[in-house]
Amino acid sequence: MIRFCVLRPSSAVFTAAAALASVFVASADVPEIVTERTGSMKFDRTYGREQNSIKNTLTPVVAAAAQATHRVFADGSHAALATAVHGEGWLLTKASEIASKGKLEIECAGGLRLPASVMDRLDAYDLALLKVEATGLKPVVWSDQPVPTPGSFLAAPSPSEGVAAVGVASVGPRNLYERPKGYLGVQLRRRDSTAAIIDEVFSGGAAERAGLKPDDVILSVEAVGVGNSDALIGEISKRRPGEDVKMKIRRGTEELDLTVTLMDRRDFMAHFSHGDDPMVLMSGRLSRHRRGFFHVFQHDLVLAPEECGGPLVDLNGQVVGLDIARSGRVESLAIPAADLKLLLAGVTTGKFTLPNLESLREDLKKADLAILAAQQARIQAEKTLQRAHQLHATVPERNTSTTASAAAAETPPAPQAAPETTLPPSNPSSDPQPTAMP
């Protein structure tokens, strides 16, 4: 079933809507091709929404937001996108994609790269606030409209290509936050309380990828000594998934330094369950940190992990959010514009703005007092109504007709209008005639 929506009479919007409608109608008859090697499905994208012809149609819609979109390079590699939020060199990006990296740079128009510094980080949203020594950046303008309803068309701008991806909103805002903890992916030798010894290394886990092996003894984590299994677990749980952690280990008689990129246990379990299931990975890689966000809405734009951190735009060109994670085969997550406006209220201080707890407590106290006063007023009104019922019950029922007659008798008569005086008709012959003077 195809649904059509009525949009405001803007030529750009109508053109974009018509193009997208043709995409989704045509994609209903896209043929499937099953390869003999993997059995995974590939599709003829001639009419797909990822075609440049479709993206080019939406380029004017995202043009303003694209000017605020920049690439972030970490140690020389493209790591994420950044969104300019203030003309004096302030930008937002996805924190976990640049965590534990050395040299950070922002690529501006013309390919110019400027050194960037992380000024603040907010783990609940996986956001990092960056600063570059530059002026004249074109900041994004956040929308004042509500979060797009499911089914609304959306687009993600790209710094060079105009449009990175096109799709629709799928799930409204929700709180997914639970503090994620780093996961190593090992079984420790619990019977030994004097050292943190690895008993088993799980396949596909962070430890295996870093080269850890059974019987390795972990001596320290980020230069903090760990004398037993509990100490190691405590140090690892303090850190977030995606964070690079330096470890010193002893293997036999040799001491080694390793760097481990921690995982999220939930992501590891998903990997353990699905392995390299082509249905999970058929549309590309997922973000390392893709769960546990405080307040996000969901859409189906196909984004690479390094395309997160940029603005999300509706068909009216309004920036409705910031893409923060590719979380599934057809799932990406975005932070609503309203949340970002609050967090960036004091952006030039170099810190995210969090709600003032004392002010909120005072507001809550005032609200409680108002509720108490309203409850007392309601109790008083109930008592007054009860007394009125009792009073009515003590008064005999009155005769309505007698009362009405008595009221009529006591009513004084209305004053009579004075009779009209009728003048006799005028007779010209009887009127006195003027007399001539002698």
Image: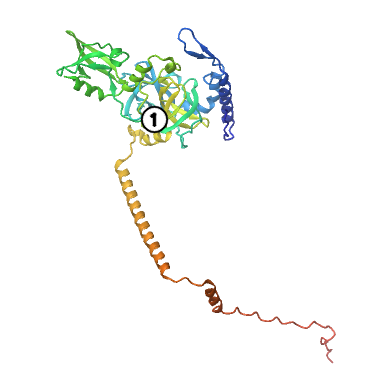
Seen from the viewer's position, the closer of residues 201 and 47 is 201
Q: Indicate left or right for 139 with 424 as reference.
A: left
Residue under the point 22% across and 24% down: 234
- How far across and how far down the image is residue 334, in percent? 42, 28
Q: Which residue is drawn at 58% across and 31% down?
A: 4
- Disc 1 secondary structure class: loop
Q: Mark 1 points at which residue?
A: 88
Q: In which quarter of the image is the C terminus?
A: bottom right
Figure disc tally = 1
- The residue located at (41%, 15%) in the rendering is 277
88, 59: nearer the viewer: 59
Front residue of 361 and 39: 39
Q: Which residue lies furthest to the left in this view?
A: 194
Amino acid residing under circle 1 = Glu
Q: Position of residue 138 (x, y in %)?
A: 44, 29
Position above or below: 115 against 386: above
Front residue (pair 96, 332): 332
